[in-house]
Amino acid sequence: MDTVTVLTGHGRFRDPDTVVVDTGTGQVTVTGATILYLRTSRPHIYALGDVNGGPQFTYISLDDSRIVLDQLTGEGSRSTADRVAIPHTVFMTPPLATVGLTEKEARASGHRVKVGSQAVADIVAMPRAYVVEETRGMMKFVMDADTDEILGAALLGVDAQELINTVALAVRHRLKAADLRNAVYTHPSDDVVERLGGAAIVRIDEAQTADV
């Protein structure tokens, strides 16, 4: 196929920051101040999905429905503030999945960081990559060097969109790398999470010494 110009685009943006919807019986305003519980300017009308300005993912819309259901039939305590360590995936070949803090963000947050990184082709614990003959990719984990807490990860490789959910759960509950590394997994499976904090440590920040 011969081309002169290739136009690429990604992402959608809500415009403007305050959305006014005409319901036929009056206008409904959606602003940032109401997004915590997904309420609009009219208390009986809720804003779910892309219109409320949150992350534009199907699974976020699903969680929106849980928040509204809790408002209507539950305790009314569930909110968007409960969303911690939400994973993201770019569905390319192979997929790229991320969660939590990047190495740069972790340092900016005051953590002394250690980084585990390894090419998929070098990870024996990922048999599926060899079975489907797709060994391209890299796995990177960011951990706190003092506590071993898992802070974030970027997974580029086969089944990254599945593996990231285990890492997200670990980040959400502030688990240590050793918690995943020492767990028992079914075999054969892509138990790359076992390698968290293992032999693939490539960087570790120097310990800070207190001034005397």
Image (tube, rainbow, N blue to C red):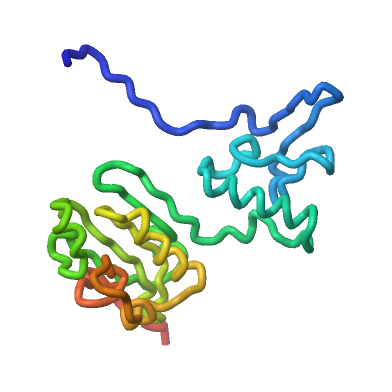
Q: Position of residue 130 (x, y in %)?
A: 14, 58
Outermost residue to the bottom: 212
Task: Write down the quadrant of residue 193 in the picture.
Answer: bottom left
Q: Is residue 125 visible?
A: yes
Q: Horizontal placement of 184 versus 12: left or right?
A: left
Name the residue at 30% across, 48% down: 95
Q: Can residue 103 be seen in this view?
A: no
Q: Position of residue 203 (x, y in %)?
A: 24, 69
Name the residue at 50% across, 31% down: 12
Q: Quadrant of the C terminus?
A: bottom left
Q: Is residue 196 above or below residue 105?
A: below
Q: Where is residue 46 in the image (x, y as percent from the top left)?
A: 74, 41
Q: Position of residue 206 (x, y in %)?
A: 29, 76
Q: Quadrant of the N terminus?
A: top left
Q: How many labels does the image show?
A: 0
Q: Horizontal placement of 43 versus 59: left or right?
A: right
Q: Nearer the viewer, residue 88 or 189?
A: 189
Q: Which of 118 and 63 is in front in this view?
A: 63
Name the residue at 25% across, 43% down: 93
Name the residue at 44% across, 63% down: 168
Q: Horizontal placement of 122 versus 57: left or right?
A: left
Q: In this view, does 140 lie above or below 30?
A: below
